[in-house]
Structure formats: C-alpha cells, structure tokens
Image (cartoon, grey):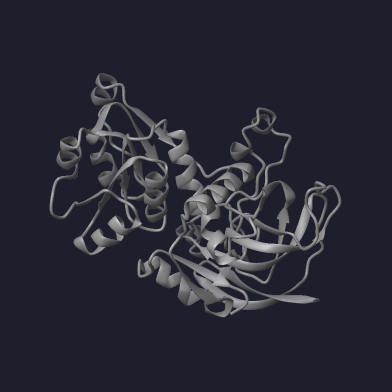
Amino acid sequence: MNTFKAMQITEPGRMELVERPVPVPGYGEVLLKVEACGICGADSGAVEGLEKNTTYPRIPGHEVVGRILSLGQGVPSYLSEGQRVGVGRLGGYCGECEQCRQGQFVLCTDQPVTGSSCDGGYAEIMLARATGLVLIPDDLLSAEAAPLLCAGIATFNALTKSGARPGDTVVIQGIGGLGHLAIQYAQKMGYKVIAVGRGSDIRQDALNLGAHQYIDTLQSDPVAEIKKAGGAQVILTTITNSEAASGLVKALAPQGKFMVVGAGSSPLLIMPGAMVGNELRLEGSLTGTPYETERALKFSLLTSVRAQIETAPLAEAESAYQRMRSGDVKFRMVLRMDL
C-alpha cells in the first residue's frame, strides 16, 4: 500500500474523504491497519474547531482498534507485527516528564491527544506511539472493543476509584454513550444501581442494562427519590449539563463521593456548607492508562459488559458523526473499515 483512505477535517466543520501517502513509523511508533474506530462526542473538539490546539487538516477519532503493520525503532519487545491493539484518547505518555516520573502516566504533560493534536482513526492507516497501545483480547471483536477504549475505561476507572463497596448505592446520571456502560459496570461490581435520566422512553433501556431503579427527572424529584433509598454513597455524573449535575449533589449520603466524567462548559455550583457539614468529596476522573484499559477489557469479557453499537463504513463517517451528535444513536456509533 502506497496510499490510504482517510476522513479528514480540512477546516473546522468540513469533513472529506481523501487519500494520503502511507507514513513510516518513527522511533517508538507503530503503523496500524485500522479495523474499527468509535465515534465519540469528544470528537467534536477537532471536527467543529472547539479545541484551541488542533491544527488542520486533521483526522479525528480516538477509539481505535487495528493490527500492527510495522514497527519503528525503540518499540517494546511485547509488540509484534500482526498483533491487534487499541489506542484511546491519550496517545501515549512520554516517560520523561515530572508526572511520568511519578508513574502518573494519564497526567503526562507531553502526550498527544489522539484525533486532536495527532491524527486518529477515521482512516485505514494510523501512526501511534507504542506507550499508548492497549492489547486487545482475542475474544473481543474490534467493533466491540473500540468504544471501551474511551467511554468504557472512563466509567470503569471512575467506579473503581470511587471507593464504593458491594451493596452500596451508586447513582448513574445520564443514560447515553457513557452512562449505558456505567450502569452495566456498576451492576456487575455489585452495587445497587439507580439510573437518573430525562424522559420515560429510556426507562426500559436503563432497567435492561442492569439498573435496579430508574428515576425520570421529568416526573419526580431525583434528590427526594434517592434520599428515600438512603442516599447515595457515590454519584457518577456522565452529563455535560453542569446545572443538572450540581443539583444532584444533595442526594449524597454523608461522606459520599461525587464523581465527574462528563465535562461541561460551565462551572459546577456546589454549596461549601453541605460539602463540609457532610464531609462530601468531589472528584474528576480522566480515562486510564493502557494497563488499566486492558483490565477494563478483561472485566468486560468476564462479565459480558458491552457497548450497544451501530456501525457504518468509513465513507459514511460524516453522516454517522452527525447522527451521534443528534443523540439518535443507542448508544455508540462505530466505523468499520471492512464495510
């Protein structure tokens, strides 16, 4: 192959199918033949010009699964040609900055953001840093694995870091691309799961996914309903509506934790008196390392957690992206290069 097809953002808001020359992997890099790439809400940063540091043209996509075509120098010995690997939002830590020296690889200060500061997976071919690669289990299909590299690890890691114990009440706010995975993980981890959403049309979906109770915010007061259940030890909010997220903090039990994975554009409004008086904790959670992602994939296989997906070919990436943005997909959209 001398060239490959890619769906690139030529300028903010303009997506087009192009052909590019196949690159050569540099030091510490591998060349991937992409098999599947999830379409995520965070792709809008590059697609619509919402991220200041994105340069164009740019190939978006950060839920990438593919096979290694070739390796550059300095790649670890556990990687080999033909191996199936994945790349998430964080494109590989540098190993040299202060955060890396402390083992905080997620917080690396010299790490590419896949599909934003470097080209991503809306393409047949992709370059990737070896330090960002996730080993994909054989029993997990590429299209199944792709959404777990972002939405999956984000919710899995938030729950594992929450401090909740089996039997605790965990509230999942938002039943979308993130929330539908969070409900499954929380139920499989042994929590009492209360799902909070907007509208009765999502009730059965939430219960089918594993929620023990669904609260429709259009029909009842979620804080009052959660307090009836004894309060929540953990609330995991996956929505970007900061006002709605803030309003749910009052449903926490004393010493409860409010976990944030939905990054809204406006501030959270939380009363300090309630935080202090009930010793509440507020914590953000940002994805995970490749090793942590591999643990999430193994857990997903063991417990049959899967993203509910729709698929589309690369040539239809723009319409698939627009469907995702409209909220018309249940619950994740994935590009498959074999379609």
Q: In the picture, residue 200 is in which quadrant?
A: bottom left
Residue 138 is left or right of residue 312, and the answer is right
The residue located at (38%, 33%) in the rendering is: 164
Quadrant placement of the C terminus: bottom right
The residue located at (16%, 55%) in the rendering is: 218
Outermost residue, right direction? 73
Q: Can residue 40 be seen in this view?
A: yes
Q: Which of 164 and 76 is in front in this view?
A: 164
Could you tell me how many numbered marks the image carries?
A: 0
The residue located at (48%, 56%) in the rendering is: 42
Above or below residue 185? Residue 42 is below
Above or below residue 203? Residue 75 is above
Residue 61 is left or right of residue 135, and the answer is left
Q: Which of 34 and 189 is in front in this view?
A: 189
Q: Where is residue 242 drawn, in percent x and y? A: 31, 45
Above or below residue 127? Residue 193 is above
Q: Nearer the viewer, residue 27 or 194?
A: 194
